[in-house]
Image (cartoon, grey):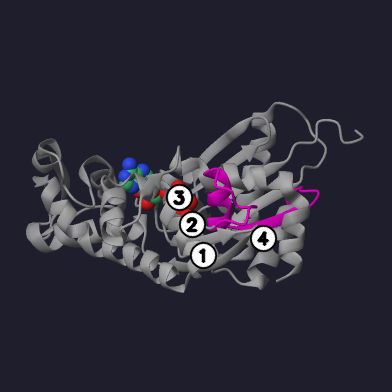
């Protein structure tokens, strides 16, 4: 169709959530990065929301997996299936039949060039005209409207599910970066372990996440935060029966202390490696937080205290990477140049 109706697509293949961004439309799809597979036939049974609802509830032959969980791609077939599913969903959501789109896919920064290649091939197989990859902190910085193409230092901390990516960016490139394997998932695990140890209660992954979102914080500051409580349900380890207990926000802040410290340590290490001119820029402009973990209450305040730098939370932190991934297609020549340098 002579390119009419061609739309560029950005896919944020996150460890926790996958988001699809279409130029001039915004985010058209947002689903958990989960795939349900039948282990005896290797067949993919469900992807996204449907697959997530199966977590912890699957019969023996079906497993719900998070293929990107540790920031690496589990296997090619599952990843291809996921990309295919999301591209199809994007086409449906856009309401038009398009010619093949250009696709930009955001990947964790620790991923190998072989894995990058596999993702590009998967996107092509799934119907992309041209496919590119972009590193997560770079996409996050674009999505947070930081001046990434200018000769000035910007420090972005993207706190996702599996990893926290810290990067200093200037002149269209990552100058220094750190990838810390502590982010939202590690916080959920810390909460689960705390409750198990303190109350002899086992809770599920989704309950732990709900606790973090409702009453979790890096530090309780206001009276309301200090007094916040929540009823949670789990299984008593001693009796094996369901039980409800009440936990306080103060306890959860204590449980999250170590995860928060690891994230701050990653920021410090990055600052230590940053050339002085760029550090001065960061000092002046501040640190920007993106990713769902940026929403943990008072995390910005704790990072500001510990680094002596101003800290800001980006607008819509959960969407920054997807928006930046899509927007990067506007600067495709720079991205091509960047990729050819690797
Ligand atoms: N209000 C909130 N408070 C604390 N954490 C939150 C909040 N909302 C979402 N999260 C957490 O943010 C994480 C998901 O963030 P995001 O979608 O940015 O990750 P991702 O991009 O999928 O992962 P990654 O960046 O590791 O690839 C989850 O761990 C989720 O529990």
Work out whether residue 218 or residue 84 is closer to the camera in this orientation and state it.
218
Q: Earlier in the sequence, mark 3 or mark 1?
A: 1
> What's drawn in magenta, residue-wise?
126-152
Secondary structure type for disc 4: helix
Q: CA distance from mark 4 to mark 1?
A: 36 Å
Mark number, residue 285:
3
Mark 1 or mark 4, which is nearer the start of the sequence?
4
Query: Disc 3 beta carbon < 8 A from ligand 1?
Result: no
| Dots 2, 3 in contact, CB < 8 A | yes
* Closer to us: 316 or 228: 316
Q: Earlier in the sequence, mark 4 or mark 3?
A: 4
Q: Which mark lies nearer to you, 4 or 3?
A: 3
The residue lying toward the viewer, choosing from 264 and 323, is 264
User: Label 1 belongs to which residue?
Assistant: 277
Q: Which residue is mark 2?
A: 281
User: Residue 258 in the image: x percent, y percent?
Assistant: 24, 65
Specify whether residue 15 is in view.
no
């Amino acid at each position: 169709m002579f390119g009419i109706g061609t739309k560029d697509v950005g896919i944020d293949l996150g460890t926790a959530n996958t988001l699809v961004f279409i130029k001039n439309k915004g985010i058209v799809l947002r689903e958990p990065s989960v795939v349900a597979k039948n282990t005896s036939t290797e067949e993919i049974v469900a992807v996204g929301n449907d697959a997530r609802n199966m977590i912890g509830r699957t019969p023996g032959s079906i497993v719900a997996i998070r293929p990107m969980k540790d920031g690496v791609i589990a296997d090619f077939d599952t990843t291809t299936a996921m990309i295919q599913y999301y591209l199809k969903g994007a086409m449906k959501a856009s309401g038009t039949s398009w010619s093949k789109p250009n696709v930009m896919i955001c990947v964790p920064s620790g991923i190998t060039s072989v894995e990058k290649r596999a993702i590009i091939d998967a996107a092509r197989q799934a119907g992309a005209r041209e496919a590119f990859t972009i590193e997560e902190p770079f996409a996050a910085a674009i999505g947070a409207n930081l001046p990434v193409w200018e000769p000035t230092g910007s420090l972005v901390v993207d706190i996702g599910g599996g990893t926290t990516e810290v990067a200093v960016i200037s002149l269209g490139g990552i100058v220094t970066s750190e990838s810390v394997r502590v982010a939202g998932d590690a916080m959920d695990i810390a909460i689960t372990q705390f409750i198990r140890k303190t109350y002899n209660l086992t809770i599920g992954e989704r309950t732990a996440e709900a606790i973090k979102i409702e009453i979790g914080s890096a530090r309780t500051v206001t009276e309301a935060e200090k007094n916040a409580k929540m009823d949670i349900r789990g299984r008593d380890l001693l009796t094996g029966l369901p039980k409800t207990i009440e936990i306080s926000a103060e306890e959860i802040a204590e449980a999250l202390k170590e995860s928060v410290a690891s994230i701050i340590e990653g920021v410090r290490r990055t600052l230590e490696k940053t050339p002085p001119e760029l550090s001065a820029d960061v000092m002046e402009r501040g640190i920007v937080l993106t990713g769902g973990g940026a929403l943990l209450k008072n995390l910005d305040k704790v990072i500001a205290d510990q680094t002596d730098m101003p800290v800001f939370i980006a607008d819509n932190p959960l969407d920054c990477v997807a928006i930046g991934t899509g927007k990067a297609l506007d600067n495709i020549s720079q991205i091509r140049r960047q990729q050819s340098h690797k």
